[in-house]
Image: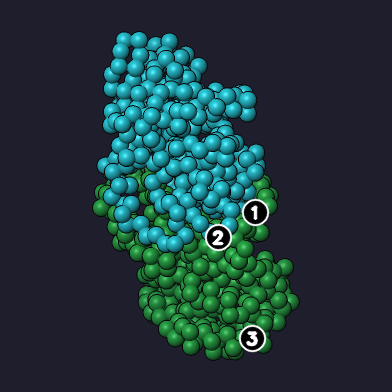
Chain colours: A cyan, B green
Amino acid sequence: MHEFELIGRLTPLLPTNDFVVLGAGDDCAVLDLGDPTSHTLFKTDAVVEGIHFLPNADPEAVGHKAIARCLSDVAAMGGLATAAVVTLALPPGRDPKWSEALYRGLCRTAARHQVAVVGGETTTNPGQSLLSVAVLGRVQRGRAVLRSGAKAGDAILVSGELGGSLAGRHLEFEPRLAEGSWLATTFRPHAMIDLSDGLAGDLRHLLTASGGLGAEIHAAALPISRAARLRAREGDLAKPAIVAALTDGEDFELLFTIASNDAVRVMDGWRSQFPGTRISCIGRVTAGPEILLRDARGIRPMPRGGYEHFSGNE
Amino acid sequence: MHEFELIGRLTPLLPTNDFVVLGAGDDCAVLDLGDPTSHTLFKTDAVVEGIHFLPNADPEAVGHKAIARCLSDVAAMGGLATAAVVTLALPPGRDPKWSEALYRGLCRTAARHQVAVVGGETTTNPGQSLLSVAVLGRVQRGRAVLRSGAKAGDAILVSGELGGSLAGRHLEFEPRLAEGSWLATTFRPHAMIDLSDGLAGDLRHLLTASGGLGAEIHAAALPISRAARLRAREGDLAKPAIVAALTDGEDFELLFTIASNDAVRVMDGWRSQFPGTRISCIGRVTAGPEILLRDARGIRPMPRGGYEHFSGNE
């Protein structure tokens, strides 16, 4: 059973209460904990050796990735992160220097984004290490950007460059907290998601959450990464760079939709605020439900399929 | 390297910020997220198959235990829990019915304590299942009960009965949220901790956090569980019931200290509020640093050693 099926069966079981503004299913949950100006964001995620990182990966980069994935989810709600807790599950006999290096990487990334790390548990996990992180964030009341608000006619924008993340970027990406918070504060994006499963899959998640809308994507507008282009030129493992940009996972860029009237202002503002990070308008939301890809040869359905982990198990 | 040593080496690395009232090292972190009346509690914990539960354990009980451990930490701060997020890491091919049963148990316990479950991730963990839970709680500003506030002369009290938890109670215990919150709201306990490593070990943690105090414990006052007494009568695995009460882990009872003048009022109030749950005054805090055990034969140092997991690895 696929992860999404299992979650679909479990979600109806989850209890709620008056603190919950938005429960499971978006990038973060949204809670009202009584602050008159802010809502609280809450998210957990885990990385597993052999699946999200290889055993010989730099432990500082692993620690970075473990928290940065959660921070990217906070960014996708338009929030800033405040605090994190960590559980490190280790095989017996793992060198404590490895754990220290992992924490060093995690804490350096937390500090760079003004996030406090307020709890660190350790336990045993025979076979491989696993690092679970939970983060809290904050967003102005009523300003959290959900997946579910896209409207037909919206412009679809994406930050950064897409594809080829497994060549290295998946261990080094910087979560787009400043960018997401600036967007949510300055504009009113209708819907936002961070790209973890690949553009094709995550765009589908956003459009499904928005009531089954569709989209038309312009292939020529896709910001294809250098890593994806390089890999497309290499031997046996080659795949067309555009397929990599559409289906490779772990880009951790922001994908959002906004009223088409606002798109140019957003892109102008972005380029002056964040000159080092590309912003691209890649298409528009349609009444759907198909997602179509337009290129020089015409228009066709978006290829299905998304991110495959190293093991292909998740 | 022991868990506490590793944590001792990692803790200085952890970044902090203005939201942090109390960082890592107590049962929960305490945060000020802007609510004018409450502080927020934050905690994460994990259970691992083969260590915290056996592979043939009832999955509903495993789900219960995974969240109840975190709720017990919230109780030990004098708080009530508000929301939880979950990561379930599963070996490939695990029957989805198992995961559903696990979630059913977890959600039933959450609902019984008015806790919302607002996120559920799944990932792959080859070899054995692992369930990581993070919880948020709330406590009146300034009323969180830390480990570090014990004073020489305090009475030492403990809820429930101790020892023999692995015979079954470790999968069924009910976190003492109502009791802990009532204590913190009605009285001013000086220090509190929940018993996960065993009374001897956790009392030491509390006294160390309180500046290196000591204690004198009356063996005759220890509330020894029926499971510990039964096991003491059985063959090869037998150990004296009092040793079980002092060193068995996973009691998940509340151990707290309070001004000795208040002890009788606390016990009277407890017995009328919670008639089904024992409360025992087991000794007093001393200037220390020794922890002494007094019994019919005289007085001697408290035996060292605490909880041993099934695998003895953690």
Q: Residue at x 60, y 72 (%)?
A: B192
Subunit under mark 2: A
Please provide percent x and percent y for residue A107: 62, 43
**Quick check: A131 left or right of B205?**
left
Q: Nearer the viewer, mark 3 or mark 2?
A: 2
Please provide percent x and percent y for residue A194: 46, 35
Q: Disc 1 residue type?
A: Phe
Please provide percent x and percent y for residue B266: 58, 85
Q: Image quarter for residue A112?
A: top right
Residue B19, numbered label: 1
How much space separates mark 2 and mark 1, taking CA atoms?
15 Å
Q: Image quarter for residue B281?
A: bottom right
Frontmost residue, A183 versus A72: A183
Residue A137, numbered label: none
Q: Disc 2 residue type?
A: Gly
Frontmost residue, A231 versus B40: B40
Frontmost residue, A234 versus B216: A234
Residue density around tag 1, few if under 14, some if 14–19, many if 20 or more, within 10 Å: some
Q: Residue at x 62, y 70 (%)?
A: B143
- Evaluate whether label 1 is on the same chain as label 3: yes
- Evaluate whether label 2 is on the same chain as label 1: no
Subunit under mark 3: B
How much space separates mark 1 and mark 3, taking CA atoms?
33 Å
User: Is residue B127 among the parts visible in the rendering?
Assistant: no
Q: Are marks 2 and 1 in contact (CB under 8 Å)?
A: no
Quickly name the residue at label 3: B262
Q: Residue at x 51, y 57 (%)?
A: A32
Quickly name the residue at label 2: A34
How much space separates mark 3 and mark 2, taking CA atoms?
33 Å
